[in-house]
Amino acid sequence: MRVFVAGGTGHSGSYIIPELLATGHEVTALARSDTAAAALSALGTKVRLGDLQDLDGLKEAAADADGVIHVAHRQDLLLSGGMDAVAAAEVPIMLAYGEALAGTGKPLVAAGSIGSPGNLGRPATEDDPALAVGNEHSGTLRARNVVETAVVGLAERGVRASVVRLANIAYSTTDGSGFLVQLIALAKEKGFVGYPGDGTNLWNAVHVRDSASLFRLALEKGPAGRYWHAVGDGGIPLRAIAEAIGSRLGLPVVSVPVDELVLPGYFGFLANIVTQTYPASNLITRRTLGWEPIQPSLLADLDNGHYFSAG
Ligand SMILES: NC(=O)c1ccc[n+]([C@@H]2O[C@H](COP(=O)([O-])OP(=O)(O)OC[C@H]3O[C@@H](n4cnc5c(N)ncnc54)[C@H](OP(=O)(O)O)[C@@H]3O)[C@@H](O)[C@H]2O)c1
């Protein structure tokens, strides 16, 4: 396929592009700077200069392609407008792709979040829809659910649209700013590795090389209107992650009381998510698309040390 990729220089995108090229696809990638254009050309893609704010340009790029993968986001809006602004900017982009692809049956695969179905008291599955968003969810991760709903809704307009829900922790040797990087930085700063309460709440993780193969499979053969779970490890106690970090850094691993002052005192802006539990299944994704995560597990990857090489 001739695939248009937005976000090809990002953490996920920089693994998706080699995956697509290695499996015989041709890629045109969006670049908003000369640096991005050079990085993308070096990977072997054609480059389309442009910005996420140019909806007509995105429409044209989608219309010219056999399919679209979207893993870009307006992270620059986070400081001024929070998650609401990032999500609000993404919906018109999805609708623009939708206009270009309506009635064609061509695929659009966009990134979503594993937490979007909320806390169900059991592992979330691919059949659990993203929860609705109201004013009361302003400023929370849930605000981003409008993007998933918009993408899946395009199935009714003849787009083979689907959402790859990325695990909370997307890890790799090139992870520069993800959750692990932040936990490690906090531990170094505080002199101990904190975990909330008893640390039994569950997080999930995926190696971005595995999530890249899932984006490709969804593009190639994913039915319309579906959610896929890019989850390798479906439920890792946060305490186990803290212990793995502590053992590598040689720092004590300490429970941080779940208290409205103490918790933010250690975790800062992460305080409102570290107590959450996000167990998730990947069974439907594996059965439907034949996806198998094959990269080292999160704890094995932490043990191999590359996250700690900066000293
Ligand atoms: N665990 C996770 O990481 C996780 C979990 C849930 C959901 N997600 C979602 O997955 C998606 C991909 O995440 P990621 O970590 O791979 O992202 P990332 O590393 O932050 O990369 C973002 C990409 O968006 C591009 N971009 C940003 N603003 C742009 C603009 N105005 N015009 C054109 N391109 C622009 C960046 O290009 P430049 O190189 O030019 O900056 C970069 O390629 C995001 O939507 C994110 O919300 C991630």
Image (spheres, rainbow, N blue to C red):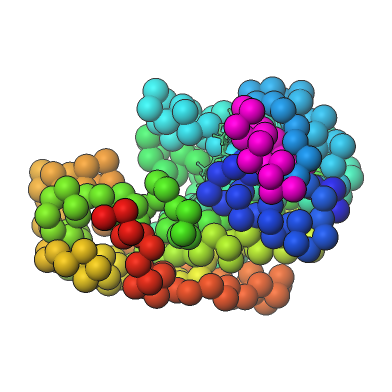
Q: How many numbered marks does the figure carry?
A: 0
Classify the position of ligand 1 by quadrant: top left, top right, bottom left or bottom right. Answer: top right
Q: Residue at x 57, y 28 (%)?
A: 89
Please determine whether, in this image, residue 19 is positioned above or below residue 293.
above
Q: Give the quarter of the image for residue 81.
A: top left
Vertical comparison of 158 with 230: above or below = above
Residue sitting nearer the eye, 79 or 153: 79
32 and 160: which one is in front? 32
Q: Nearer the viewer, residue 207 or 21?
A: 21
Residue 32, image x and y in percent?
Answer: 63, 28
Q: Residue at the spot x=38%, y=27% of the render? A: 79
Q: Point out residue 150 in the picture as x, y percentages from the top left corner.
A: 65, 41
Q: Residue sitting at 60 percent across and 32 percent down?
A: 35
Quarter of the rendering containing residue 300 = bottom left
Q: At which x and y percent is residue 167?
A: 48, 59
In the image, is residue 134 above or below residue 252?
above
Position of residue 259 measured from the top left corner of the image (x, y, whole percent): 12, 50
Q: Residue at x 39, y 23 (%)?
A: 80
Q: Is residue 311 magenta?
A: no
Numbered range of the magenta stretch = 28-44
